[in-house]
Image (cartoon, rainbow, N blue to C red):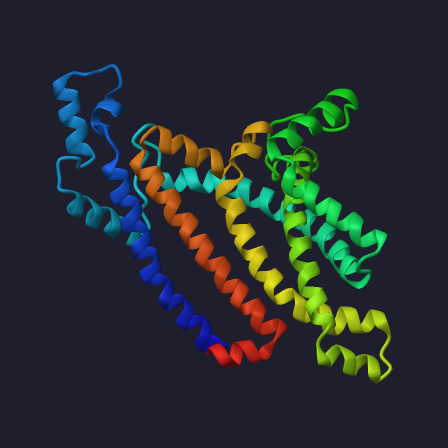
Amino acid sequence: MLLFILRRCVTAVPTLIIVTLMVFGIQRALPGDPALIIAGEQRDPEVIAYIRERYRLNDPVPVQYVAWLAQVVRGDLGRSIRTNQSVTELILQKLPVTLQLALLSMLVALLIAIPIGVLSAVRKDTALDYAGTLFALSGLSVPNFWLGILLILVVSVQWNLLPASGYVEFSRDPVENLRRMIMPSLVLGTGLAAVIMRQLRASMLEALKQDYVRTARAKGLFGRRVVLRHALRNALIPVVTLIGLQMGALLSGAVLTEQVFSIPGFGKLIVDAVFNRDYAVVQGVVLVTATAYIVINLLVDIAYALLNPRIGVGRA
């Protein structure tokens, strides 16, 4: 297992380098002069020359890339062109907010999807199965921003149960923090639950047809034990892959939900950096996002080995 993890970490390095090359090259290929954008209305030639010199914009692109990569290796992601704030500090401020939202959303999704997915597979072609399929279709069809606005109108405006928007740090007030994160977590979690439920139902139906399930039933094991211990454990393998992919997507793609509920998260930081042509922030954010995807995929592979030890042995 340890050898397998080390090999996965080593193979992640070329992937990160390729990602940084692509992002750096695409950013520099965008039209417009970043020095003029930074200067804003101040178009003094001396100011523009100073900006070019300070941010090494006069250097060739390969030289800029190597210099930036050398800083990253030392743990320095640079400074924001717009605010002169450390990119590392910006990411450390925004990432925990989105990470909490992603974890709560995934928890909501699993609490909904696993029971419904298992019951839909066990009770195939019954009213319960049809209800689960209807829920999945609804979750996939309803846009997150629309559901978020609807929850604000009903839960916050009409019923006055939860705050409509805003964010409070967990360390300052845990109760208020959770109250403000409930609705955005439900918005993201219901959509995720629909996707996970469909995959789990299909995997469970396939697992219930396998010989080991029939053998377990032939030995006199109860139905619940067969479903939970034998069928569900093997059916979770493709679901774990889906969870890993969705978790990575949550970290980088919860922009609309964060906008609706005014949550100062990672997604808003990405959008603002792209629109402002803030090269240092974009590069730092993409690097962190790519690293998060790689770490999540590594955790998914470890989960494979825990669910089915033969997988880990075969890959090592």
Residue at 59% across / 56% down in the picture? 243
The image quadrant that residue 304 belongs to is bottom right
The image quadrant that residue 182 belongs to is top right
Give percent across and percent down for residue 34.
23, 29
Q: Is residue 222 left or right of residue 27?
A: right
184 shown above or below 76: above
Q: Is residue 123 left or right of residue 40?
A: right
Give percent across and percent down for residue 148.
65, 31
Q: Looking at the image, which is closer to me, 35 or 71?
A: 35
Residue at 58% across / 34% down in the picture? 257
Residue at 70% across / 34% down in the picture? 179
Q: Is residue 93 left or right of residue 284?
A: right
Res 163 seen here: no
266 shown above or below 112: above
The image quadrant that residue 45 belongs to is top left
Q: Looking at the image, which is closer to me, 89 or 307?
A: 307
Give percent across and percent down for residue 10.
36, 68
Res 192 seen here: yes
Q: How many marks?
A: 0
124 shown above or below 186: below
Give percent across and percent down for residue 307.
63, 72
Residue extending furthest bottom?
219
